[in-house]
Amino acid sequence: MGIRTLLGMLAIALAVIGLLATNENYSLFLPALLEGAVLTIEIAVLSCLLAVVMGVLAALARMYGPAPLRWLATVYVEIFRGTSALVQLFWLFFVLPQFGVTLDAFLVAVLALGLNVGAYGSEVVRGAVLAVGRGQWEASTALNMSRAQMLRRIILPQAFVAMIPPWGNLFIELLKSTALVSLITLSDLAFKAQQMNQTTLKTIPIFTLVLLIYLAMSLVLTIAMRLLEKRASLGLARGRTV
Amino acid sequence: MIWDWAFTFEILPVLARAAIVSIEATLLGFAIAASLGLVLAVVRIAVPWTGWTISVLVELIRSTPLLIQIFFLYFVFPKFGVVLDAFTAGVLAIGIHYAAYCSEVYRAGFDNIHRGQWEASIALNLSSWTTFRDVIIPQAIPPIVPALGNYLVALFKETPLLSAIAVLELMQTAKIIGSETFRYTEPITLVGLFFLAMSLVSAALIRSLEGALNRRTVR
C-alpha cells in the first residue's frame, strides 16, 4: 500500500476521532483514553529499544559467539519465539516473585515485550547480515580488517537497509502487543477502555475510540518506517551506481 | 520448596483438559483464517473494483490489536443484537484477524503464478471459477504452505488472549488454579512449556510438510 494511501487513512482516522470528540458521548472518554495511550507509547518505545538491542546481540552471539554464548542465544530465541507473549508476561509478573525477584509491572511489560520481539528480531538481523554480498566479506578480509571492524564498518551498515522493513513489521506487532499489558494491571489504553466499559457500560463509543487510536498509532509507525526505508535505500542506490 | 512436584501432577490433568480447548480454538480459528483469507484474496483478483476496499479492510484489521478486536466482538456486538458466547467471539476474532494476514500470503502465492497460466486459461475460455479451482490454486498453494504454517503457529500462541474474555482455555485455567491455591509457579510454567513443546513440534511438522510438497511439485 502506497505511502499516500497510508497518509490518507491516517488523516481519515484522525478526522473521525476529531469529529467524534465534538459529540458529548465520545468526548467524555477521550482524556482518559489519551492518558492511557501515552503509557502505551512509553512502553512501546522502550520495548522497541530493548528489542533492537537484544535482536542484534542475540544474532551476533549466534553467528560469531563462542559455543556457550551461541547456545545461550539459541535457547533465548527458541524460548521467546516458542511461547506466547501473554504467558511470558504472566510468568515474569506472577512466577518470578516466587523466586524472590519482584519487578514492578511497567518493568515487566517492557522486559517481556522487548525480549519477545527481540527474539524474532534476532532472526531478522541474522538474515540481513547473511544477505550482504559475499564480495563485501572477502574484500574486508583482503583489507585485513578484524571481525569487529568488518561488522561495524562494512557489514552492519549495509545490512541495516535490508532490516528496516521487517523491523517495521515487528514494531507494529509490538505496538499491538502492548494491549496485553492491560492484563497485568498497567493502565494503558486497553486497560482504560475496559475499566471505563465496566463502570459506564458505554461500550460502543469507548471501543470505537480505542480502535481508532490504535489505528492512528500504527499508521504513524508504518509511515515513519516507510520514510526511513526510502531514505536509507536512497543512499544504497547511490552507492551502487558508482 | 519452590517447585512442588506433587502439585504439578495434581494440576496436570486439569491443564491437559484445558489444552484441548486451546487446540480446538486454534484449529477452528485457523480454519476460518485460511478459508476467509482465500476468499478475500480470490475476490480481490476476480472482482477488480473490490481491490481498494479489501486492502483498506486488511490494513484496518492488521493495524489494531487482536485483544481489542476480541473485546469488540464480545462487548460491542451484543449492543447491535448479536450476542456471541465467549468461545465463539474469541475464535471468530482470531480467525478474522489472521484471515487478513493469510489473504496477503495467498495474494503473494497468486502473484507468483506465471502470467502464461492466466493467459492460457483465458485462451481456453475457462470461467474464472474453473481457472482458480483447477489451474491457479493447485499451483499457488504448495509454495505458501510454510508461510501459512507460520501463521498457524502464531495463531496458536495468540489463543491465551481468549483468557481475557474468560474462555476456559489453558491460560485462564492456569490463572484460576493460581488464584485458588496461591501457587502460580507450576501452572504458568507448565503452560509456557506446553506452548514451547507444541510450537517446536508444529515447526518440525511444517518443515517436513514443506519438504514433501517441494519434492512433489518440480519447479
Image (cartoon, rainbow, N blue to C red):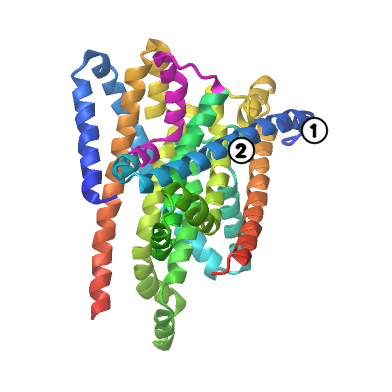
The quarter of the displayed image where residue B87 is located: top right
Label 1 vs 2, first from the N-terminus: 1
Q: Which residue is mark 1?
A: B9
Which residue lies at the image location 49% right of the left edge and 38% below the top edge?
A: A108
Q: Is residue B17 found left or right of A241 in the rendered image?
A: right
Above/below status of B36 relative to B150: above
Please state which amino acid type lies under the numbered disc 1.
Answer: Phe
Q: Which residue is mark 2?
A: B27
Mark closer to the observer (1, 2): 2
Residue A88 in view here: no
- For this orientation, the residue located farthest to the front is B125
Q: Between B215 and B58, which is closer to the camera in this rendering?
A: B215
The answer to whether residue A64 is visible is: yes
**Magenta span main SS:** helix
Task: Give the side of residue A44 with respect to residue A22, left or right.
Answer: right
The stretch in magenta equals B57-86
> Which residue is more in the foreground, A184 or B161?
B161
* Residue in the image at 31% along x and 47% along y: A222
Which quarter of the rendered picture does the N terminus of chain B lie within?
top right
- The percent position of residue A238, horizontal first and vertical second, equals 23, 73
Few, some or many residues within 10 Å of mark 2 (<14, 14–19, 20+) = some
Subunit of mark 1? B
* Residues under numbered marks 1 and 2 in contact, where contact means CB atoms less than 8 Å apart: no
